[in-house]
């Protein structure tokens, strides 16, 4: 079995045809229908596959039509004389902009554009008043209840000041410049119910899906507004940590939950 695969890979070692005999142009045509990870894996097989895997025509097909707009975030010398494959690799890593408060990147499997906006890139009521909000540096992200810290190298959460999020739900809303709207409500703290179901929200970063919108054309640009509100003043609330908002293609949300989007 090993000898047969070796012959197929490198060519006619035993007098028969092999994968190495396929013209590079034909391999490139096949690669048009494969994902970037699949192309990179097949590039290891032989010289023809490696050549096709570096073809600009293959990687042009994997880049979004507006990838040049993403490159404008970077200084030109960062991608000068780059091949399309190198550009894809560059854009598949998070690119910070807006003073580092936002990031944009390409999904490594589909080439779709994804974006995140950190809490410092949002307009948050009372954010300058330290009685209500405090900036807490952390390598983690998303949204959770309780104050995170490390003790003896282990992650711990303090819930002493976590209260009020089980009384009324939080309302999430989004709207676009072309009139699309979506909204939903979530109760952020349901400790008794979570424990009964074997779940635990407290101390865990939670993603909440606000809604979906459709962009039919890149011109004119579609503006998106997002809000998260709990304005009932009959009770106090505390202990909420907010990190970022993600804007990702809807068909990637399952991979996002599994933590393999980037």
Image (tube, rainbow, N blue to C red):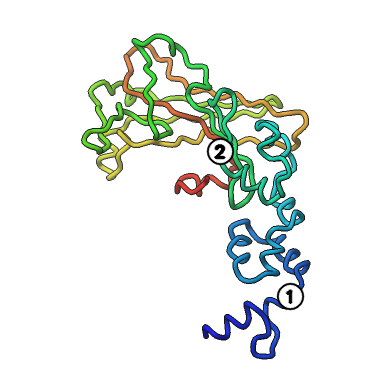
The crowding category of the residue bearing disc 1, from other C-alpha atoms within 10 Å (few below 14, some 14 to 19, many at least 20), is few
Percent of width and height locating residue 34: 66, 61
Secondary-structure class at tag 1? loop
Camera-side residue: 149 or 185? 149
Name the residue: 67% across, 77% down: 19
Number of callouts in the render?
A: 2
Which element is circle 2 on?
loop
Specify the farthest residue to the bottom. Answer: 15
Q: Quadrant of residue 222?
A: top right
Specify whether 249 is left or right of 202: right
* In the displayed structure image, the side of residue 104 where residue 159 appears, left or right: left
Q: Position of residue 119 (x, y in %)?
A: 47, 24
**Does residue 164 appear left or right of residue 106 in this picture?**
left
- Alpha carbon distance from label 2 to label 1: 36 Å
**Residue nearest the observer in this picture, 215 or 157:** 157
- Tell me the quarter of the picture where residue 237 sits: top left
Q: Nearer the viewer, residue 12 or 190?
A: 12
Query: Where residue 255 appears, x then y in whole percent?
Result: 50, 49
Establish if 210 lies above or below 199: above
Q: Residues within 10 Å of mark 2 (few under 14, many from 20)?
A: some
Reading the image, the residue beneath label 1 is 22
With 167 as the anchor, is 231 left or right in this view? right
Answer above or below: position of 72 versus 135: below
Q: Which residue is mark 2?
A: 94
């Amino acid at each position: 079995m090993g000898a047969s695969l070796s012959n197929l890979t490198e060519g006619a070692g035993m007098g028969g045809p092999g994968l190495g005999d396929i013209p590079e142009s034909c391999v490139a045509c096949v690669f048009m229908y494969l994902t970037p990870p699949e192309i990179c894996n097949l590039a290891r097989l032989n010289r023809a596959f490696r050549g096709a895997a570096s073809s600009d025509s293959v990687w042009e097909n994997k880049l979004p039509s507006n990838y040049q707009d993403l490159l404008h975030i970077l200084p030109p010398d960062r991608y000068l004389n780059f091949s399309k494959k190198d550009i894809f690799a560059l854009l598949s890593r998070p690119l910070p902009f807006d003073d580092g408060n936002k990031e944009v990147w390409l999904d490594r499997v589909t080439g779709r554009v994804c974006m995140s906006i950190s809490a410092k890139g949002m307009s948050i009521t009372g954010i300058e008043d330290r009685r209500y909000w405090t900036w807490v540096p952390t390598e983690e992200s998303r949204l959770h209840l309780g104050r995170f810290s490390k003790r003896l190298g282990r992650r711990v959460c303090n819930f002493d000041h976590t209260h009020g999020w089980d009384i009324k739900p939080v309302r999430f809303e989004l709207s676009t410049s072309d009139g699309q709207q979506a909204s939903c409500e979530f109760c952020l703290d349901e400790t008794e119910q979570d424990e009964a179901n074997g779940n635990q929200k407290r101390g865990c970063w939670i993603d909440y899906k606000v809604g979906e919108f459709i962009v039919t054309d890149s011109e004119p640009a579609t503006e998106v507004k997002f809000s998260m509100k709990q304005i009932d003043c009959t009770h106090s609330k505390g202990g909420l940590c907010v990190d970022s908002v993600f804007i990702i293609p809807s068909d990637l949300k399952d991979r996002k939950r599994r933590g393999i989007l980037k």
